[in-house]
Structure formats: C-alpha cells, structure tokens
Image (spheres, rainbow, N blue to C red):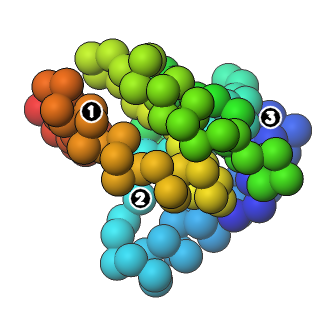
Amino acid sequence: MNHKSMPSLTEEEIKKEVMDLHQSVYEKFNYEMKYIRPPKGEFSEKTLQVTNALGYKNVMWSFAYEDWNEEKQPDEEKAKQKILNNLHNGEIMLLHGNSKTNTNILDSVIKEAKNMGYEFKSLDEFEE
C-alpha cells in the first residue's frame, strides 16, 4: 500500500501492508492477489515467511531500469531500445506505472516484442 521496505517492518506491519493492498486490489478489480513483488525488491527470511504464510508467492523481476523517478524520466527512444535489447525468454519485466515514458512507449514495445517472436503470458501460465 505504501511501498515500504518490508524487512524494516514488524510482522504485524507486513501483514497490514499486504492485506490492505489485497483488499484494495479486490475492491477495485475484483481480483484475488496471490503473487507479491516486495517493494524495491527488498526482502528477508521474515518477509518471505510472513507473505508465504498469508498465501502469496513472491515473484521478482529479471529486467528493470530506472523508470520510477517522475522527475527524471528516461528518453523514450533510449528506454524503448533498452527494453527491447534486453528481452529474454521467461522475462519478468518491471515497468513502473507512474512512468510517463512507459505509458508512451508500452504499445510499441509490446508490438515490437511480438514481432520478434515473444509472447506475453500471465504468471499463472508459467506454473502450468
């Protein structure tokens, strides 16, 4: 909910952050969360234990770039090339939704990746 680094939180704070997010996602999208990406990619044995006990599977990314800083948005063409040049099988791409650059290039990135032979699947399809 607040994108806090979870290793610094107590067990109860972790539960509250995760379950408040779960409730918000359910109310807005009618979707029951089952995956979680720890904010900033920061985790510990405690955070994994708590989130697993809550029924979540922790998932990390295999590609990210500095796109999150709203005051320092990357050049669109450079960002697009960085994303396309780093595509790989099984990739889990982290793109931040607050990035205007991502918003502007996402359609063309998806189309070009598909033209390169890549497919997009949900995490559920990877587990099959």
Near mark 2 (Cα within 10 A), the count class, few <14, some 14-19 or many ≥20, is: some
Q: Is residue 14 left or right of residue 108?
A: right
Q: Where is residue 103 in the image (x, y as percent from the top left)?
A: 51, 58
Q: Position of residue 42 (x, y in %)?
A: 73, 30
Query: How far apart are labels 1 and 2 at the CA level?
Result: 27 Å
Instruction: Inspect the image, locate mark 3, and give the three-letter code of the amino acid beneath it.
Output: Pro
Q: Earlier in the sequence, mark 1 or mark 3?
A: 3
Give the secondary structure at mark 1: helix
Residue 106 visible within the image: yes
Which residue corresponds to mark 2?
33
Q: Which of 117 and 21 is in front in this view?
A: 117
60 to 111, vertically: above or below: above
Which residue corresponds to mark 1?
113
Q: Which of 100 and 62 is in front in this view?
A: 100
Which residue corresponds to mark 3?
7
> Which of label 1 and label 2 is nearer to you?
1
Q: Are marks 1 and 3 in contact (CB under 8 Å)?
A: no
Quadrant housing residue 117: top left
Q: Where is residue 17 in the image (x, y as percent from the top left)?
A: 70, 60
Q: Which residue lies furthest to the bottom in this view?
A: 27
